[in-house]
Every structure is written in structure tokens, then in C-alpha cells.
Image: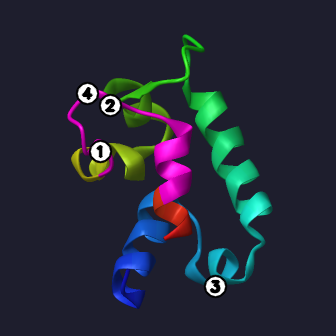
Amino acid sequence: MSLLSKSLLYFALGLSVCTAAHADNSVRNKEIADRFASCDKNRDGKLTKEEAKGCMPRIYDHFSYIDTDNKGYVTVAQIQALASK
């Protein structure tokens, strides 16, 4: 993944490039998991576009990019995997 792609992904996740670039993977993954959990209103482990809209607007804006399987939801693992590329 190019530096530009990584920067755009970090922006989409609401993480600063500087912080994310220097953060330990476990710290970054915990931050993502915590934000995801606060948005997953029905606690099903899936974040729909509607759930993201009010809580994670950048994920909402880039939802189709993250939801590569077009299932109508994203998981914390998908977001973490993209962030680690």
C-alpha cells in the first residue's frame, strides 16, 4: 500500500497519520476496537453504514471501500486489517 493510500485510510479511520505511523499495532487496534464497540449499537459485531453514519462519519463516507464483499456491514477485523496495511 502506498504512503498516499495509507494516509487516506488513516484519515478515513479518524487517526492522525503521525500517531498511527508511530503507534504500536496493538494500541492502534485497541483504539479501533473501542471506537467500533461504541458505534455497534446492537452489539452484533457488525457495523452497518447507518451505525457508522452517526458515530464514525469517516467510515460512513468510505464504507463501500471497506465493505469489499458488499455485505452491508464491516467488522472491526476488516478495519484493523486495512489499517495495518
Of the residues shown, which amino acid type is indicated by label 1? Phe
Q: Which mark is residue 15?
A: none
Q: Residue 74 vs residue 84: left or right? A: left
Q: Which residue is mark 1?
A: 63
Q: Nearer the viewer, mark 2 or mark 4?
A: 4
Percent position of residue 40, x then y: 55, 23
Q: Residue at x 48, y 71 (%)?
A: 85
47 vs 8: above or below: above
Q: Which residue is mark 2?
A: 49
Residue at the spot of label 3: 18
Dot 3: few (<14), some (14–19), or many (≥20) neighbours within 10 Å? few
Q: Which mark is residue 71?
A: 4
Q: Amino acid at mark 3?
A: Cys
From mark 4 to mark 3, how far is it between C-alphas?
32 Å
Residue 48, x across and y down, in percent = 37, 26
Earlier-in-chain disc, 1 versus 3: 3
